[in-house]
Amino acid sequence: MIFPLENCRVRAAWDVPTLPDSTAELLDVVDRNDRIIATASRAEIHRRRLRHRAVHVLVTNPRGEIYVQQRAPNKDCQRRIYAHYGAPLQA
């Protein structure tokens, strides 16, 4: 369920005229101990399911409900699912 913030215009990410090509981003590949072992494109990391650093943000309201977003239909993985916000950390 989506809990939009009051007085905010809610729109889907795919309403934005152009989305950057995030598949070309370079990310650090890390081992189980978070040591950098390689650098690869985001597309390769997702295709090969490589371990990489990311940040996740959970936004809650005073009742403890979590605000989620629906992912765009043109994402390279997990299209149109409802999820909290997360992003990879660039190399």
Image (spheres, rainbow, N blue to C red):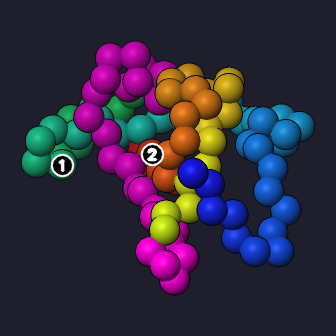
Q: Residues within 10 Å of mark 1 (few under 14, many from 20)?
A: few
Q: Closest to the observer: 45 or 5?
A: 5
Q: Residue type at mark 2: give it.
A: Pro
From this view, report whether residue 63 is shown above or below residue 51: below
Res 70 label: none
Q: Which residue has dot 2 on it?
A: 88
From this view, report whether residue 33 is shown above or below residue 67: above
Quadrant the C terminus occupies: top left
Disc 2 versus disc 1: distance between alpha carbons?
14 Å
The span shown in magenta is 41-64
Instruction: Please report the residue visible at 49 percent of the width from the left and 52 percent of the height from the top.
Output: 84
Q: Is residue 24 visible?
A: no
Q: Is residue 56 left or right of residue 85?
A: left
47 drawn magenta: yes
Q: Which residue has dot 1 on it?
A: 34
Instruction: Please report the residue visible at 85 percent of the width from the left and 62 percent of the height from the top.
Output: 9
Q: Is residue 15 left or right of residue 47?
A: right
Q: Most extreme residue toward the left, as rendered?
A: 33
